[in-house]
Amino acid sequence: MARLNFLGFVISQGKMEKTIKVRILQKKFDRKVQKYFLQKKDYLVHDEGNICREGDLVRIEQTRPLSARKFFAVAEIKKNKGQQFATYQKEAKANVQKEEREKSSLLEQKRTLYEKFSDNSLYEDLSSVQALRRKENLTEEEVEKITEIMGKYNISNTNVESPSKELFTTSISSLSSKIESLSNDLKLTETLNNLLNDESKKDIVYQISEKLNITPETKKNIRKNLIRKYLKTAPSEELQKLGLSL
């Protein structure tokens, strides 16, 4: 006697050991309306190797009763759509991990750059640039000094060919503004870290948190960004009332 065979889709997998749920669609004739309808029925099916995935099209075959509700087993996988989706999930996870590593590497580079500029060299460069801006003519040594500072802060300019002041006015101005911006950012970061890590300044943090509607449930990174934005945009008079200065 031939065994029953059905084609169906795996709709559930991994919830029971060596067992999957397969949905079978069959045509059924309704005598009342004289029309065929698709009738669905779910079977518990034995999967010895746990190789089927949700979405696979499989052929199941009747076997001896394996449990109270399981008397079919997987005979063949027709289309492994579920396996393809599992592969896609694995590749997507690997891509996410790769992006996270790249972001961590970029963050480490920024941290290294911050540590590099956090010493007195930044302020010395700023003083040198300001002194050169006041001079009428520049010597070759001063031109080399400007070129070195521009390379240090990754500023390029095609006009660095002559010691003439006119050719360097734009370069020195942009360099000065960039160094001043870095200096302000460093000072802001130092003030913020000192404010959040100093136990004696808890009252100041509490006052700022009340103004910004920051609650204890607010995440640390969000709270830090909000306080940083406040310190950057708040008027100097308001900061002085709190005992802060930038």
Image: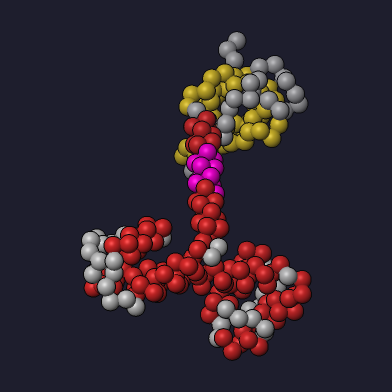
Q: In the image, 135: left or right of 115?
A: left
Q: In the image, 78: left or right of 207?
A: left
Q: For the N terminus, give its image quadrant.
A: top right
Q: Is residue 198 visible?
A: yes
Of 229 and 57, nearer the camera is: 229
Q: Which residues are magenta?
A: 93-104
Magenta stretch secondary structure, dominant: helix
Of 1 and 212, nearer the camera is: 212
Of 67 and 133, nearer the camera is: 133
Please name the residue shown 58% across and 27% down the image. 52
Q: For the C terminus, give its image quadrant.
A: bottom right
Q: Give yes or no for residue 239 being in the magenta stretch.
A: no
Which image quadrant for residue 219? Answer: bottom right
Please name the residue shown 66% across and 64% down the image. 220
Q: In the image, 233: left or right of 197?
A: left
In percent of width and height, residue 178 lies at 41, 69
Please name the residue shown 28% across and 62% down the image. 140
Model colouring: secondary structure
Q: Give yes or no for residue 95 being in the magenta stretch.
A: yes
Q: Is residue 217 visible?
A: no
Please name the residue shown 71% across and 79% down the image. 204
Tell how many labels: 0
In percent of width and height, residue 44 lies at 66, 29
In percent of width and height, residue 3 lies at 59, 15
Which image quadrant for residue 10? Answer: top right
Residue with the most extreme top position? 1
